[in-house]
Image: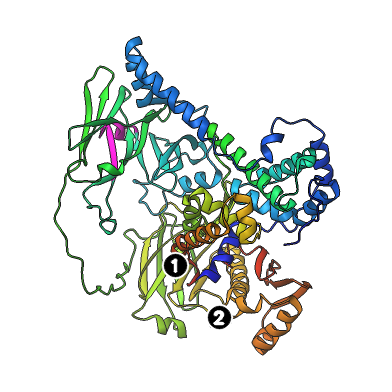
Amino acid sequence: MTDLLEPALDDLVPSFADRQADWEDVVARSETPSGRKLRTLSRPTHPRRALALIAALVLVVLLATPAFGLQGLVLHLLGRKNVSFVNSPSAPNLVKKRFLDLPIGAPSRWATPVEAAKARTVATFTIAGHPRRLWVAPTTKGGYCYTFELSFGGCRQLRSDRATARLGVTWMGGNPRHGVNASIVTRVGGDITAPTAAKLTARYADGTTTDIPFVWVSAPIAAGFFSYDIPTVRWTKRRRLVSVALYAKSGRRIARQSFPVTFRVRPLPITPVKQRPPVLPNTPHAAPTRPFQQGSADGFRVVVGRNGSVQFTQIGQTPILRELVGRSAGFSCFRLTTEFGIFSTRGFGQGGRFASHVGFMLQGVGRPIDGCEVQASIGRTWPDRLHDRAAVEIPLTKKGRDFFTDRAAARDLALFVRSKRMHTLRKEPATQANADIRRVYGTALARSAITITATDATTLRFSERSPTGKRFSVTVHNGRIARQNLKPYAFVF
Amino acid sequence: MHRSVVTPGSGASEAALEDIYRRRYATFLRLGFAMLGSHDLAREAVQETFAAALRERTSFRGEGSLDGWLWTGMLNTCRQEQRRRRRLSDDPPPEQSTNGQPAEWAELRALIAALPEQERHALFLRYYADLSQDEIADVLGVRPGTVGATLNHARNKLRVALRPEVTR
């Protein structure tokens, strides 16, 4: 396992082997006086003294304010913080892309009309002790979507959804494995739609209360958001969180959410239940409408309608299709897109027991569809018995055909480089590794399209040219992946 | 690790600094990228670290290795940058591009981000700066035994993320 940690960590950070150093720039910078110079090379310092000073100042202010009549103001500042949406920085492209992908799979009348390009980073919260950003985006119908980084999120798609509940609460229960009952609330978060909201208060079983800070994001979002980790001392039956209530400035209660508690012990199942793959629908709920996109290959025909309806029909037999009977398979169609600078397949599919007729609606994928496929649930080793293809690949456009061809080449190279034996071989000195790889893989390698070059004593370059002309390569330096261009077609480590 | 020879008490020579810079530029960049999540910020941190080292080279007392002194400087430069970014709380750290595979290593990234600072720094110095246990101890100002335990602890936590990802 530890052996795999290195390549995984390696994959997270580029090698930068091709970056040019610039010593002249260093010399030029060193001649410019900088305020950072003394701290830069000091031993690691901890800002404890500064923090202690700030903490002391905060304490003095909090203690002193009743005398100056400022208590309410301070509490108010700790409660609600107003944030300007328009002045907030734009969200990263990857976040915008995730917002854009929200409607995939939802029926059109439920699809979230989110304006992904307008997504912004509006605040940073502390969740489980770590800073987590809050991203929000408006919808075209007067609503909004929000996501707390690596945590949770939600949408109120329509303007009218704002009125359904003034306080939307998501909560997390304790983990029984850590000795905390599942009905003890350990974290609460959510959104607020009441513009008059001034204070959010947590009430505990022992009668005490705490104010929960929240941000209020200006129009077009016009909503508040919060995430609050319940202190661990409150993770007991007697001191647990029992409710969260929202108050207006006048003190009027706007909304309340209580947390029911059930301390029943639920026995865990002793024998795991074997899940059978679900049965897939034979036909979509609406027939494909004109103009159709259609094609056939590998024993299947597919018809995609303008309305997003797709019908797979088996028209022939192949060895892999015979093998798939009674097993699970994935049926899907996709469109190739470059959104916010990110090239990806925007697709939708359904997985379940293999069937000769499968139909469903492609929700939120758009048109034209570039290809459809049936993925078999089989493991892959190099050389791959399906020649790095899916069980069924039906291109519907030239782009789709090229994608399938390129993916096969990239997958072939990835499977070869990431194989278990190769992980051992590539740690050898390059020339030795080159010879050993040829000896171990022999004729299979000679028959393949993969070429291997030892560029220096420690570097091996694996490459494969796709029939479309696209060249894929993986450079391995001292056994680690230094450079590669297989994404998003295939995955190598 | 190749060490540059420096006479104790004489400070560091420009040639020795340039030698380390040219040999280990990519390694310094990797550490910067791991800590700051952006190539531009990483490059800026490396350039600033060496510029400061060049300015302050006479203050290097030669008690430890010159490499260790520079790694400490690099770590502090990155920390300063992180603190500066935290102060501008609405200024998001740049997102790392995953070329359309947002789920790839997401769990591993999250677990690394969730590690305590010392574990994270020890891990980065071990894997991206390629430092030995003794050298990491020197940079972090702890005992070598502590580094070993810290690294083990961090690795154990990260195993969780690797199980489903790489055995497929």
Label 2 resides on the chain identified as A
Q: Is residue A160 magenta?
A: yes
Mark 2 vs mark 1: give the one in front: 1
Is disc 1 on the same chain as disc 2? no
Q: Nearer the viewer, residue B69 or A116?
A: B69
The residue shown at (21%, 42%) is A240
Percent x, y of residue A179: 25, 55
Q: Amino acid at mark 2?
A: Asp
Mark 1 Cα-neighbour bin, 10 Å: few <14, some 14–19, many ≥20:
few
Tell me how the rendering is colored. rainbow
Q: Nearer the viewer, residue A142 or A191?
A: A191
Residue A18 placement: quadrant: bottom right
The residue shown at (46%, 57%) is B107
Q: Nearer the viewer, residue B69 or A386?
A: B69
Disc ID at residue B164: 1
Percent x, y of residue B97: 59, 51
Mark 2 Cα-neighbour bin, 10 Å: few <14, some 14–19, many ≥20:
some
Q: CA distance from mark 2 to mark 1?
A: 21 Å
Residue B132 placement: quadrant: bottom right
Label 1 resides on the chain identified as B
| Secondary structure found at label 1 | helix
Q: Which residue is mark 2?
A: A384
Segment colored magenta: A159-171
Instruction: Say left or right for B68 vs A149.
Output: right
Percent x, y of residue A14: 65, 57
| Secondary structure found at label 2 | loop
Q: Amino acid at mark 1?
A: Pro
State yes or no: discs 2 and 1 in contact (Cβ < 8 Å): no
Percent x, y of residue A419: 57, 77
